[in-house]
Image (spheres, coloured by chain):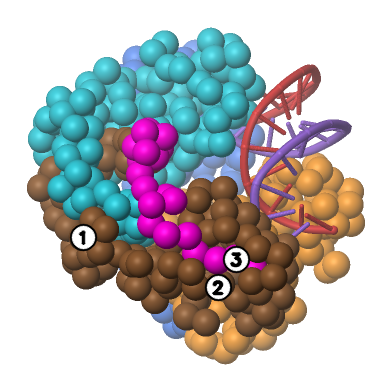
Chain colours: A orange, B blue, C brown, D cyan, E purple, F red
DNA sequence: GTGGTCTAGACCACG
DNA sequence: GTGGTCTAGACCACC
């Protein structure tokens, strides 16, 4: 499967998995109703422990991205299940504020910062609201 | 000192300290050549462990924001010491990518995301490159 | 047959089947001496595994609700076969205690909780003792 | 600590822990801002694995009952953090419906069922809304 | 000292 | 075969 894990990263492995699955949803390589690989399969492929994959899946479940199924494993929810809500906007704000503060502090112009964001958006192919899957 | 620590936050206390000192540099409440409070003083004021403040200072030192003198304690460097470099741009990109991916996934339009960023910039008073302190 | 299975529910499918058959007895859509569908038939109708239906039937048998014949399949017992006994009262108590504890904890007034119960009773049409079937 | 674990119960150990801590909040033996025992300590006391206790604490955290702290461990939230909301009422309904259906089916009169509930309420000392702690 | 992460391996419930 | 639970033991981050 399309995924690279950096065992030496500060980011926990389960977060890396979670992030890349979300990326997959954005880029269209993971679609609504797709089943993710079984925890055992995926763990074997990535060379990590099955519990680590399981934790990633449970995190995605808790965030509304997937539903965990007895037989089919983790199945990707339709986009409506994880539409941005107030809680999410709060979280984004809290995540962005220190990043932006540091950028300002380091002398990065607002335009430059916004350009970085735009470039990332373009990487993801300018997916628009509602087009990401389904 | 102007600082609020949330002991219940998921963000480590030393990161909260580091973030707020950077915010202070951005807003001008912390200036070049200012001495930060001594670790003992600061720890006592915040009601936290001395080692925690020390860790925050060492992080800031490592990132170029301050210099640690034996006598004067942690002293804020001039802006040139921590101008954005390639390494920083790499880090910002890595930090932003999963945030933007999740926003896309959750159906947040690019314009909305950029507006959130702009609003944070305005909170910081539209500080421009080079104006932040000194 | 009148039954909806939620494959995504946390409740095991065999429990869902068992619950809905009990509901059927309460509402009168399943009567004493009725034969339940054959495991094969039922499994095919619901699009699930044959073993799952079998497990539900065995559970119902063990609880006294049905009898399993070789020919007629699962046949609904008369109400006397599954009248509440001490064991049942013990079970109900054990099931209700954590639910009530949590309600209290979350600030739900006793009257509100009892009203919820009453409303469910009314959904089931105020069936009275002994009137449920037969 | 006041807690009894039944290793042979169908109810997972982590659920038993979670239930009894909620009971503790209701009866007043666990109060707002109390720290629960450390996962290691508690696991040793109960003769179970530390991860099992950890899972219980994380469940309580997710449900709003506690906050997990780096130093103080799991700290009980004020009642406002876990006031009943619409989601909770939905869950209660779903939990009660099969219990009530079975009671009806087994010939338990509505009054008897409500009496069972009342008796449990009295076990918990007729705690009223808002009186449970704080 | 605390909890968080990860590994390894077992058994069970589910279908 | 799947995920869920539990155990055992390791290392690390935090304070």
Q: Residues within 10 Å of mark 3 (few under 14, many from 20)?
A: many
Q: Pointers 2 and 3 in contact (CB under 8 A)?
A: yes
- Kindly indicate the quadrant of the structure image that contains residue D32: top left
- Tell me the subunit letter for badge 1: C
Callout 1: SS: loop
Which residue is rendered at x = 54% and y = 55% of the image? C60
Question: Do the residues indicated by labels 1 and 3 lie within the same chain of the protein?
Answer: yes
Read off the residue under disc 1. Answer: C128
Q: Pointers 1 and 3 in contact (CB under 8 A)?
A: no
Q: Which mark is residue C74?
A: 3
Q: Is residue C116 magenta?
A: no
- The one nearer the camera, A59 or D107, is D107
What is the spatial separation of the Cα atoms under label 1 and label 3, in whole angstroms?
Answer: 25 Å
Residue C79 percent coordinates (x, y)? 38, 57
**Where D25 sits versus A88, above or below?**
above
Read off the residue under disc 2. Answer: C35
- The one nearer the camera, A93 or A87, is A87
How many numbered discs sit on the rendered protein? Answer: 3
**Where C103 sits versus B71, above or below?**
below
- Kindly indicate the quadrant of the structure image that contains residue C90: top left
Q: Which mark is residue C6?
A: none
In this image, A51 relative to B120: left or right? right
Provide the residue span drawn in magenta: C73-92
- Tell me the subunit letter for badge 3: C
Callout 2: SS: loop
Residue C29 percent coordinates (x, y)? 39, 76
**Where A22 sits versus D78, above or below?**
below
In this image, C54 relative to C81: left or right? right
- Tell me the subunit letter for badge 2: C
Which residue is rendered at x = 78% and y = 59% of the image? A38
């Amino acid at each position: 499967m399309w995924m690279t894990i950096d065992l030496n990263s500060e980011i926990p492995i389960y977060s890396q998995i979670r992030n890349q699955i979300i990326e997959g949803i954005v880029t269209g390589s993971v679609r609504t109703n797709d089943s993710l690989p079984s925890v055992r399969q995926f763990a074997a492929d990535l060379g990590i422990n099955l519990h680590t994959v399981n934790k990633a899946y449970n995190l995605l479940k808790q965030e509304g991205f997937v539903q965990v199924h007895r037989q089919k494993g983790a199945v990707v929810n339709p986009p409506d299940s994880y539409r941005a809500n107030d809680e999410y906007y709060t979280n984004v704000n809290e995540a962005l504020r220190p990043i932006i503060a540091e950028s300002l502090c380091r002398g990065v112009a607002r335009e430059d910062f916004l350009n970085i964001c735009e470039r990332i958006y373009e990487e993801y192919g300018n997916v628009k609201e509602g087009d990401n899957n389904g």
